[in-house]
Image (tube, coloured by chain):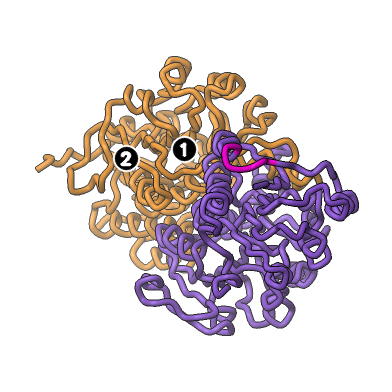
Chain colours: A purple, B orange
Amino acid sequence: MKVLLLGEIEHAHESWSSLQTLAELASPRARHRAEFVKECKSGQLDGALVIYRTFDSVDITGRFDEELVNVLPESIKFVCHNGAGYDQIDVHACTRRGIKVSNTPHAVNNSTADVNMFLILGALRRFNPSISALRQGNWRGHPPPPLGHDPEGKVLGILGMGGIGRNLKKKAEAFSMKIIYHNRKKLSSELAAGAEYVSFDELLATSDVISLNLPLNNDTRHKISTREFEKMKKGVVIVNTARGAVMDESALVKALDSGHVASVGLDVYENEPQIDPGLLANPHVLLVPHMGTYTVETQAAMEEMSISNVRCVLERGHLRNVVPEHCEL
Amino acid sequence: MSQRAALLIGAVDHARKEWQDVGKIASKLYEYPEGSREDFLSKCRNGEFKDVYALYRSNQSNGLTGNFDDELLQALPSSLKYICHNGAGYDNIDVPACTKRGILVSSTPIAVNDATADVALFLMLGALRNINQSYQAVRQGKWRGNFQLGHDPKNKVLGILGMGGIGSAVATRAKAFGMQIQYHNRHQLPASEEEGAKYVSFEELLKTSDVLSLNLSLNASTKHIISKPQFDLMKDGIIIVNTARGPLIDEAALVDALESRKVWTAGLDVFEEEPKIHSGLLNNENVVLLPHVGTATFETQRDMELLVLDNLKSAIQKDKLITQVPEQKKERANI
């Protein structure tokens, strides 16, 4: 059997090389998409059963869209994606080719929720002007920075109450925030653990802080845009650690410039690594460059999870977990 | 009854009406919103604040008058019996000198706890995640720049030095992130208040903590409580967070420890000589720095102002304070 590695293993080297007893471990020679397509078509990668891919390997192959999925060797039956968000992959094209996809939910929950909470605090407290002024040698700056707000008693509206959203809820409650949520489906009272389920419109209208924790797909692209900003409270704070494209970035800039949105905390952007200049120019925003899972512990755990999916395929012919779209297959 | 006037030094920004209301029970309201120490001392000595019984001052107004030391206390009208201070830290007031003169002092504990603990957690998360490198890189158009992976707080040992109101608030929050809490304090808390935190000696706190948060007050015996000998005892790669007072840490020794990576990253809201910051910190990319904004929210600023005004009214009407500083009170038996 053959495993095709797209991207790098950075932590779980032992677990990865231990797969050698079960299969040949191969990497493409290609360094960008055109080369990769050529390499697939040449038959050089034939015989590979399972692909392990990383988020950053999009630099080599480009998006796993229909065109790319269709040139993969016929033998490919499984793609193990190292990441919780898998919007880089057209899972429906995979379904049509008989390819099943796994991702790494759960492993990312704590570290993503931690960055999420960091951004909520930073945006509510309006720390960015102070941080900048201090680093420029101006202490608090002139004029003095705006006062922030305490999270205590504020309503946090979580859009997308999956693993990360529920993890965030517990942390936000330690700061005495009140949690409401909107989800495709209302959760059981056990899972909701006291959070109030509301409609999308009610979440927009009543939240003091809105946190985006939903996956990116065709239904959620630009879920937050001009109409949604208009429904929000004046002075709302928004935080996004999910995917940039769930929010219309240029509409966000307008809403910030008008003051309707008081401040934002962002870990993700529509066209990473590019950021709308309107965001960079705004002193009231907290920007971090997609660091949601960037800890030693979480990166290692994610790789271990992905590798264990590869191992399960090699030993038992199936994945340990599949993306929701492939659950019925 | 003799005249009991009130004096406001500095500004009240969020409870102006409540300050005016003090006029209903005080014989007169004086204000000293701007000027200088020399000017203030001269006005005091010229009898311009006759009959002042209680005054309102703050850490902010300290920039106006300078410290409430012997010289200033001497100049204040002899009618003064109460100093109602806006700030949980009051190291700029010579409390023993006040006590000697029969002047009672209040501060603003409790009101500051949540806001300060929130800053401590922001700094702690930022330091754990080594966020500053990439935070600065993004703003410079470099995306992530040259960054090092951070760490998750889960299962790390947080050592809290000073388990008062703020320390306890920090502990509550840190537990939600999966941290294990240990603390050192002048006295161990009653078991019912520990909430699972482990009491350890100062030395053990230094030796076994992964993250150290300073939440103790500054006084003569705690100045430079963290200096080179203490850094030498700590784990390699420890993370330091300080939202208490800058002089608790020997700032030059901290810079050395950061440069050697003995201290892996730090999060600081306070500095030894504010507003001056050691250049070794300003030039260090492994630290998250804030300019003493611990209580800088609308809600907390108003709560603090209201607490000072409540102390002021209580002093004038009832001759007692609500939140008198511990140094002036007899200790309660720990029963």
Q: Is residue B313 above or below residue B268?
A: below
Specify few, some or many for label 2: CA neighbours under 10 Å numbering under 14, 14-19, or 20 or more. Answer: many
- Magenta-colored span: A20-25
What type is the residue that disc 1 sits on?
Arg
Q: Is residue A222 left or right of residue A121?
A: right
- The stretch drawn in magenta includes residue A277: no
The mark found on residue A125 in the picture is none
Q: Chain of mark 1?
A: B
Picture quarter with the N terminus of chain B: bottom left
Q: Is residue A294 left or right of residue A249?
A: left
Indicate the secondary structure of the residue bearing disc 1.
helix
x and y, in percent, of residue B244 in the image: 45, 38
Q: Is residue B197 above or below residue A48?
A: above
x and y, in percent, of residue A227 in the image: 71, 83
Closer to the camera, B267 or B138?
B138
The mark found on residue B163 in the picture is 2
Mark 1 / mark 2, whichever is N-terminal: 1
Farthest residue to the left: give it. Answer: B335
How far, Cα to Cα, is label 1 from label 2? 42 Å
Closer to the camera, A123 or A190?
A190
| Disc 1: which residue | B45
Q: Is residue B97 above or below residue A108?
A: above
Closer to the camera, A73 or B140?
A73
Q: Is residue A311 left or right of residue A289?
A: left
